[in-house]
Image (cartoon, grey):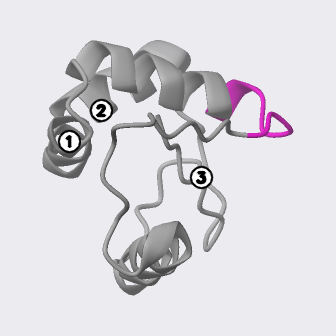
Amino acid sequence: MNALSSDQLKAKLLNDPDTQAIAEALQLPLADYVAEVLAFHANPEREPEVELEDDAPEPEGGLDALLAATAAELESTEQLNDGFEPRRVTLVVF
């Protein structure tokens, strides 16, 4: 299996409809979201930071419920053979 180069992976992420939808849901520019995803890909030991603004509404069911639902949704989708380890999901929360 040939792993994608950084430029190939970036191009794939920028053109991926799921990546575009996640960036939109997070209200982040697509390029900024992809840059963060690539940073985590390059540094898998890096721990995500979770920050909630004081005036940000609490997700329905709390943050744990949101993360569990997101993880379940990601696990239910088929993984592409693009160099990522199967079933290894990193959720990036801004």
Residue name at image x 25 percent, y 24 percent: 28
Within 10 Å of disc 3 (Cα), the crowding (few <14, some 14-19, many 20+) is: few
Asked whether, in this view, residue 13 is left or right of residue 85, the answer is left
Q: Which residues are magenta?
A: 41-47
Mark 1 or mark 3, which is nearer the start of the sequence? 1
> Is the residue 81 above or below the residue 50 in the image?
below
Magenta residues, dominant SS class: loop
Q: Amino acid at mark 3?
A: Phe
The label shown at residue 84 is 3
Where is residue 82? Give x, y as percent: 48, 49
Q: Residue 7 sits in which quadrant?
A: top left
Residue receiving disc 2 = 12
Can you tell which mark lies on residue 16? 1
**Looking at the picture, how far across and down is residue 45, in whole percent?**
86, 39
Residue drawn at x 54%, y 21% as measured from the top left: 5
Q: Say whether residue 26 is left or right of residue 61.
A: left
Q: Is residue 74 left or right of residue 67?
A: left
